[in-house]
Amino acid sequence: MPQSKQSNRDAYSLILEAIDVGVYKPGDRLVESELAERFGVSRTPIREALQRLETQSLLERDGRSLIVASLDHNQMAELYVVRRELEGLAARLAARHATEEEIKVLQDMVAADDALVGDPNALSRANRRFHEQIHLASHNRYLVQQLDLVHRTMALMATTSLAVQGRGEIAQSEHKGIVEAIAARDEEAAAVALKEHISVAFMTRLKRDAVLREK
């Protein structure tokens, strides 16, 4: 692979990961020179990465500056509607196409993640790995691409719903039900279980936001 293309991909991935883990939060300004220095990449691939992120609506213009985008209530609701349907489809296809090895990986993930319930940030990262594993188990590359974009956009939410007290335990129980349905090759049950899981996460976030508005 030519060095320029490799640098472009690296710059994009580095900035995206920094947004994803909260180094840069919604409203933060991204400056080419600062990013180039932070990541040890020249300014040209940084500029191209920023343009790509703006095209994907992960960055937005604030005058002449680019800032990390934020989601208003309607955008968040729209995102969850799309995520719910796509995740449900992924679970349905995983129940149909997942190999026995992929199912075992999902079962192992759920078992291991029980130990993370007290750490919302670690559980959030594990949650993302779990969902990505289901996406891959769907064996549909186009669905995986769309879900990847949805999950990238989820990074624009500054906090995780898993930080709400009690949500971690409930989410883990929901994950177990999803995997059980996939393992049983019950496509409808898997789709319903994952869609309900996303709905509960959305309701949890809405309730949390309502409380924060009162403060």
Image: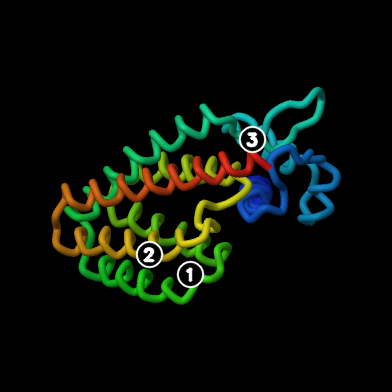
> At 23% across and 46% down in the image, what residue appears?
192
Three-letter residue code for mark 2: Gln
The mark that comes first in sequence, 1 or 2, is 1
> Viewer-proximal residue, 134 or 165?
165
Q: Name the residue under label 3.
A: 70
The mark that comes first in sequence, 3 or 2, is 3
How many callouts does the rendering have?
Answer: 3
Three-letter residue code for mark 1: Val
From the viewer's perspective, is the residue at label 3 or at label 2 nearer?
2
Residue 55: x and y in percent read 60, 29
Measure the alpha-carbon separation of dots 1 and 2.
8 Å
Looking at the image, do the residues carrying marks 1 and 2 touch, with CB atoms under 8 Å apart?
Answer: yes
From the viewer's perspective, is the residue at label 1 or at label 3 nearer?
1
Q: Crowding at label 1, few (<14), some or many (≥20) Cα neighbours within 10 Å? A: many
Q: In this view, does 45 lie above or below 106?
A: above
Label placed on residue 172: 2
Quadrant of the image occupied by residue 136: bottom left
> At 19% across and 59% down in the image, what residue appears?
181
Q: Crowding at label 2, few (<14), some or many (≥20) Cα neighbours within 10 Å? A: many
Q: In which quarter of the image is the C terminus?
A: top right
Label placed on residue 117: 1
> Viewer-proximal residue, 155 or 54?
155
Measure the alpha-carbon separation of dots 3 and 2.
28 Å
Residue 95: x and y in percent read 20, 55
